[in-house]
Amino acid sequence: MANQAACLDGVRHTFRVGPAQMPNIDAKEVIIENHSIAINLIDWKVRDLGWLIQTWQMILGCDAAGVVVEVGSDVHHLKQGDRVLGHAVSLVSQRPKNGAFQHYVAIEATKVTKVPDSLSFNEACVIPLAFDTAATGLFSDRHQGYLGLEWPTLHAKTSDKKVIVYGGSSSVGALGIQLAAATGVYVIAIASAWNFDLCHSCGAYEVFDYNDPSVVDHVVRAVETAKPTDFVGILDAISQEESYRIVVPILERLGRGNLATVLAGPSNIPKTSKTNYIEGVNDLVDPLWMDFMSPALEQGVLKCLPEPFVIGRGLERVEEGCLANKKGVSAKKLDIELK
């Protein structure tokens, strides 16, 4: 087997496609032959700003879907030939073999799960990073500024909790709505008006337009009138000034609730709230990969939303995908087919 990768040689370099070393396997890893990869905001942020990388060159990419070709000696729930999706973590490991932007990638098996035959690799590739990010914000300790929800289940019972998801049509937002709904909580989403249907299909009970000048009033009223009594907080899947101008006043008006953010949080968080930044790679949510994700995909509890938009075929498309993501993408995930 010969490997190729879209390598990054330094900050603000373009991705260079060429031969790459075939990943060696550790005992707790699997090697996946990628059929589809996806582009995330973090990819172009790292390229433009040099975030996280200690030594160049590096192979980036977090979302992978394909077929297992080799299994580490300590891995027992996966086998050669399995159709899988996985969360590649070269940004944490600092090892190029763990980046998704290549034909063969090594991923720790706790971040890999089987893909039902009913789903394409393009669809499956929507899930990995967004799943881990949303799950970390929703299920991490409430006392640390996260939302502290119970684990999701395949047959959720109605909860006494309610949450807000800002940016409900984004990758993290759509997964956040679905995961929260799978705990039985009452989900209120904030998104653009043309993405209301997507948010409802993910499980949001109510959706409000962030362009509405009265959006804060509407959301506060929705929280106060919703039957569940325990408002735990907001998952902000955008975490920019435009979202903070809305979510901070909501928390101020309600006088309670935490704020989980995907980037650095606001400096003016109310004293009645706690906030924390989500680390998208950790072992907290690994049990969900092992026990929940695959059956949830099989049974439709978890949907591959937002839908993938395939921008082309081949690693040469990685640069194009990062530029497109940087310009802005609404209610879709940019995918690249490799096979």
Image (spheres, grey):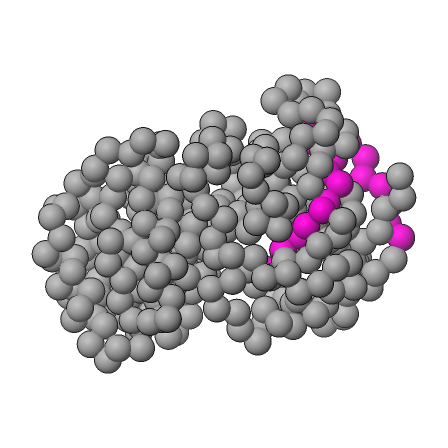
Residue 70 coordinates in the image, percent (x, y): 77, 29
Residue 130 coordinates in the image, percent (x, y): 50, 51
Left/right of residue 248 with respect to residue 192 in the rendered view:
left
At a point 89% along the width and 39% down the height, the residue shown is 1
Residue 209 coordinates in the image, percent (x, y): 29, 71
Q: Image quarter for residue 311? A: bottom right
Left/right of residue 27 with respect to residue 245 in the rendered view:
right
Residue most toward the bottom? Answer: 213
Reply above or below: 329 against 339: below
> Quick check: is 309 in the magenta stretch?
no
At a point 35% along the width and 58% down the height, the residue shown is 199
Residue most toward the front? Answer: 118
Find the magenta span and give its range. Answer: 19-40
> Quick check: is 34 in the magenta stretch?
yes
Residue 127 coordinates in the image, percent (x, y): 53, 47
For the question of whether residue 130 can be seen, the reply is yes
Left/right of residue 27 with respect to residue 215 in the rendered view:
right
Count every numbered label the image shows and give the total: 0
At a point 13% along the width and 63% down the height, the residue shown is 221
Reply above or below: 332 against 130: below
Looking at this view, is 204 or 218 the one in front?
204
At a point 68% along the width and 50% down the height, the residue shown is 36
For the question of whether residue 284 can be seen, the reply is no
Q: Image quarter for residue 182? A: top left
Looking at this view, is 234 or 125 the one in front?
125
